[in-house]
Amino acid sequence: QVQLVESGGGLVQPGGSLTLSCAASGSIASIYSVGWYRQAPGKQRELVTSISGSGATFYADSVKGRFTISRDNAKHTMSLQMNSLNPEDTAVYYCYGTVDMLTGRRNSYWGQGTQVTVSS
């Protein structure tokens, strides 16, 4: 079994910055791909950014130039650096990982979600 645990959410003023972290633990051989999603009230969950198994990065247009995703393969962690935050970034943020298990299987897992609120 694998768990993804997020940290770093909170309240920030418009124009501010916040860093989210996500740590994976369990029967992990390696993490194939990672990503961050968010869900605002009344809206569908959307992909914010990801790093594919080949290392390619994706950013939603709404966060390009402001958000940066990173990962530490050795520590099985990922981070999301968010700058120039605006109220439209307010949402619950979820980390996501596709994990190669010690059993040889590949499964996908979600973090529990962390609230990010951008407000003055």
Image (spheres, rainbow, N blue to C red):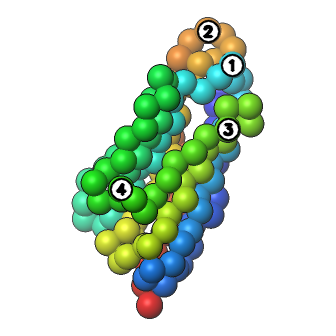
State the residue at coordinates (39%, 71%).
90
Image height check: is 15 above or below 6?
below
**Count of labels shown?**
4
Residue 111 is labelled as none
State the residue at coordinates (59%, 50%).
79
The x and y percentages for residue 5 are 64, 48
Q: Residues within 10 Å of mark 2 (few under 14, many from 20)?
A: few
Marks 2 and 1, how far apart at CA: 8 Å
Marks 3 and 2, how far apart at CA: 21 Å
Name the kind of residue labelled 3 in the image: Asp
* Residue pointed to by mark 2: 104
Q: Is residue 100 left or right of residue 47?
A: right
Task: Let me know if residue 5 appears in the view.
Answer: yes
* Residue pointed to by mark 1: 29
Q: Quadrant of the C terminus?
A: bottom left
Marks 1 and 4, how far apart at CA: 31 Å
* Residue pointed to by mark 4: 64
Label 4 sits on a secondary structure element that is: loop
Q: Earlier in the sequence, mark 4 or mark 2?
A: 4
Marks 2 and 1 close (CB-CB < 8 Å): yes
The x and y percentages for residue 63 are 36, 59
Between 65 and 41, the one nearer to me in the picture: 65
Residue 72 is labelled as 3
Name the kind of residue labelled 4 in the image: Lys
